[in-house]
Amino acid sequence: MWQYRELIRNLTVADLKNRYQNTFLGFFWSLLSPLLLAGILYFVFRNLWGREQDFAINILVAVMAWQFFATGSSSSLRAIVRNSGLVTRVYIPRQILVLSNVLTSLINSLFAFIALLPILLILLGHLPITVLLFPLVHVIYFSFMYGLGLLLSALYVYFRDVDQIWQVLVRALFFGSPIMYPLSIVPPDLLPYYLLNPITQLILIYRDVMVAGDLPSLYGIGIVAGFAIAAYLVGSFTFKKLERRFAEAI
Amino acid sequence: MSAIIVDNVSKRFRIPHEKKTTVFQNVVGLIKRQFSYEEFCALKDVSFEVKKGEALGIIGRNGSGKSTLLKILARILYPDSGSVSLDGKVASFLQLGVGFQPELTARDNVYIYASILGVGRKQVDKMYDDIFDFAELRRFENMKLKNFSSGMNMRLAFATAFHAVPDTLLIDEVFAVGDQAFRRKCHDKMTQFKAESKTIVFVSHALDAVKELCQRSMLLHEGRIITMGDTEKVINDYLAMLQRGTKQ
């Protein structure tokens, strides 16, 4: 893969350029749109629903964490099929298409979190020192997304229903994670299973390091890292198996 | 010294009776136990070698397996059995301008296309002027590709591809574009490659071009090598085969 770093870079940059093509503000949108989203969320939850400030802040963090998963996975799902020209007409390691796609999502997610920092600073009055752990968490998150992207994109070449099925799963996970409601409303007897969800754990970790200033729980890190490794192993195994007939099946 | 060794390569395509692309159709198929697909043998036990610096032509009728063979050499398709080994850096031109992005400028696209062909940024920087002079598109380097005519598109693709010089070139019928002058330039470039003793595999229906470029050729028919050897002789065999075909 290393000898293809130039190609990975070019594809990622092209992806980003394409996204903001023909807009006046260009790249600035990748900062502006998460800011606006944060503004809407904060306004709705703080003023309209009259929730306390802490809750509104927690929603901001959770939504930023969620976005990477939701948009990243649905776009990497199509990474192979969308680039059918590069699959059927020329040889490049096909993982590159998935990797550059997930990298694009990662960059967007980084912009979103960067936009979040000044907001947190204003609302909290300070930034906890544990924010420095953010890159580490995001690296684990990224490898989870890459493994998932390999799996989904390879399956999608053969079974186009994967798209619809995945959309349903993503929606289910949205309500299965503590984004729009606090963890405390989850029934205690369900809680152990609920906490097995890696997205739940990621949200809790981001809240710990970015808002509460706590070190994340080892259990949470373990779950997320475990899912990341499993996703990578299953993803690259499936991808390798299915890749052989990509050019015929696409 | 062999640059390309192909050993007993076979390739079968599955042609499903009913194309199933959704989980639902596959579930129905599972229950009804219909996995029916026909196998179509595109290549049968093909073996040959190409020496370093040699230009090999591949000719044959439509559906004889030429393009499949080239795609296997390019590692786009995997053979079902047999093995292929290629020496050095390989660039395949099955279609030009693969990965061109219409919303980006000509300049961006040259860098993207070059990196697809395995050429780094620094190398492109060095050849950048040459590429645009060759393509005669100097004035349009900052224009978005979607505003290019198809001729300009092809010229840019050609110019980039020709400057991304690998050790081995796999070329599928991509020549008949551009005006006379540009075709002349492409032709000269090919001759230059040959003089620089690059290994070339050339698939074409244009027998004159094959005759001019390749000393040795191969005639494929229904996935098998019929004859292989001196281009003149192979072309005669091919023409004879075509004539037999029309008489029947």
Image: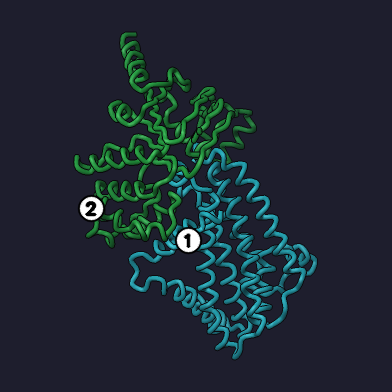
- Badge 2 crowding class, 10 Å Cα cut-off, few under 14, some 14 to 19, many 20 or more, is some
Residue identified by numbered label 2: B136
> For the point 23% across and 52% down, which residue is it?
B136
Q: CA distance from mark 1 to mark 2?
A: 28 Å
* Left-right relation of B74 to A173: left
Q: Outermost residue, left direction?
A: B180
> For the point 67% across and 75% down, which residue is it?
A182
> Chain A: what color?
cyan
**Closest to the observer, A106 or A124:** A106
Q: Outermost residue, bottom direction?
A: A125
- At mark 2, the secondary structure is loop
Percent x, y of residue A216? 72, 75
Q: Is residue B185 visible?
A: yes
At label 1, the amino acid type is: Arg
Q: Which numbered disc covers residue B11?
A: none
Quarter placement of the C terminus of chain B? top left
